[in-house]
Image (spheres, grey):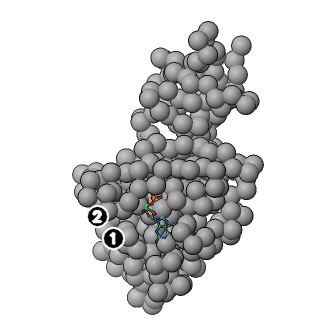
């Protein structure tokens, strides 16, 4: 008899599948192929069909159709992603922020939120105000508890993924949200000196009526692996769309070197944030050189 469950963790070559009130370690049925785009046919967050073996483990027989998948880190059927950064230690680099935003946009998730942690270290309490017209920004501190209640309100249902660079305090924030979690937290100096990430695997953790997902931090992302190329990259900069309508080369404009470009004109008028445009140009160069 087949049961339906949800993959909550992949660890030690086992998929841990929650079915009812049980968590069953499962292996993958051999004929489930790898998924070229994301590397694995089954991901954390997937709903799967399993059959049981005598030794209390199980076998994943099939994967149900996904609503969406966050490509990096791979998590399926996501309701919102909270892109987490820190005011300082590590410093927030606009290019890295925009890289994460582009990947989240490409994944077509229902909701993208930017969370700025370590606000206790900020002189400017409106840190990142220039992104406010584009994304919801939460300013919080896992250390002092500032903003944590507001964060909690957003998490009451669905699957919320905490993604972002190593050391920004994703695990610390989850611990602040739920005192019982006791997730492992690491020193930033260790992470930088030894390249050591404290969180090693993505894990779905039950909270309220939904799930929180703690993920390992990462910074190097291959954009072309995520299906981004010079034609579609600009669609992940959502504020470009309205201005791209007035580009001379309506369909062929890459908004870089072309004449009469509506996007470039908007940057000049200050209607598109220059920092966003500069990130776009850098990423455009990256996807162009990767492809050819
Ligand atoms: N000042 C300050 N430090 C914080 C805050 N939140 C976390 N930290 C510190 O930041 C460091 C990294 O925290 P982690 O929670 O391990 O960061 P992470 O994002 O989970 O890192 P990875 O698991 O490696 O991706 C720890 O030394 C925390 O004590 C905060 O709000 N303010
Ligand atoms: Mg962590
Ligand atoms: Zn253009």
**Residue situated in front as seen by the camera: 123 or 225:** 123
The residue positioned 73% from the left and 51% from the top of the image is 208
The residue positioned 58% from the left and 65% from the top of the image is 113
Disc number at residue 147? Answer: none
With respect to residue 191, does 140 lie above or below? below
Residue 165: x percent and y percent?
Answer: 41, 59
**Residue situated in front as seen by the camera: 183 or 272:** 183
Residue 216: x percent and y percent?
Answer: 44, 50
What is the count of numbered marks? 2
Residues at badges 2 and 1 in contact (C-beta under 8 Å)?
yes
Q: Which class describes the residues within 10 Å of circle 1: few (<14), some (14-19), or many (20+)?
A: some
With respect to residue 112, does 52 lie above or below? above
Instruction: Tell me if I can see residue 254 in this picture.
Output: no
Ligand 3 within 8 Å of disc 2? The answer is no
- In the image, is 203 to the left or to the right of 216? right
* Residue at the disc numbered 1: 281
With respect to residue 1, does 273 lie above or below? below
Residue 148: x percent and y percent?
Answer: 64, 68
Q: Secondary structure at mark 2?
A: helix
* Residue at the disc numbered 2: 285
Q: Which class describes the residues within 10 Å of circle 2: few (<14), some (14-19), or many (20+)?
A: some
- Image quadrant for the N terminus? top right
The residue positioned 46% from the left and 67% from the top of the image is 85
Q: Secondary structure at mark 1?
A: helix
Instruction: Tell me if I can see residue 77 in this picture.
Output: yes
User: Seen from this angle, which residue lies furthest top?
Assistant: 54
The residue positioned 72% from the left and 64% from the top of the image is 153
Marks 2/1: CA–CA distance? 6 Å
Q: In which quadrant of the rendered view does residue 37 lie?
A: top left
Residue 94: x percent and y percent?
Answer: 39, 73
């Amino acid at each position: 008899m087949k049961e339906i469950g949800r993959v909550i963790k992949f660890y030690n070559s086992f998929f841990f599948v929650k079915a009812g009130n049980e968590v069953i370690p499962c292996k993958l049925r051999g004929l489930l192929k790898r998924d070229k785009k994301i590397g694995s046919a089954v991901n954390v967050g997937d709903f799967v069909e399993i059959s049981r073996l005598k030794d209390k483990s199980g076998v994943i027989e099939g994967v149900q159709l996904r609503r969406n998948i966050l490509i990096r880190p791979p998590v399926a059927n996501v309701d919102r992603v909270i892109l987490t950064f820190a005011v300082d230690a590590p410093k927030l680099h606009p290019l890295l922020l925009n890289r994460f935003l582009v990947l989240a946009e490409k994944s077509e998730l229902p909701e993208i939120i930017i969370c700025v942690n370590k606000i206790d270290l900020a002189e400017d309490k409106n840190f990142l105000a220039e992104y406010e017209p584009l994304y919801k920004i939460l300013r919080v501190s896992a250390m002092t508890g500032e903003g944590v209640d507001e964060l909690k309100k957003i998490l009451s249902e669905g699957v919320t993924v905490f993604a972002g660079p190593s050391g920004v305090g994703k695990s610390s924030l989850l611990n602040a949200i739920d005192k019982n979690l006791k997730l492992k937290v690491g020193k930033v100096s260790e992470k930088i000196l030894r390249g050591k990430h404290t969180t090693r695997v993505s894990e779905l953790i039950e909270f309220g009526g939904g799930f929180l997902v703690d993920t390992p931090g990462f910074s190097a992302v291959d954009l072309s692996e995520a299906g981004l190329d010079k034609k579609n990259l600009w669609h992940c900069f959502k504020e470009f769309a309205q201005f791209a309508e007035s580009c001379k080369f309506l369909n062929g404009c890459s908004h870089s070197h072309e004449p009469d470009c509506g996007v470039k004109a908007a940057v000049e008028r200050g209607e598109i944030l220059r920092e966003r445009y500069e990130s776009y140009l850098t990423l455009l160069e990256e996807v162009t050189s990767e492809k050819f």
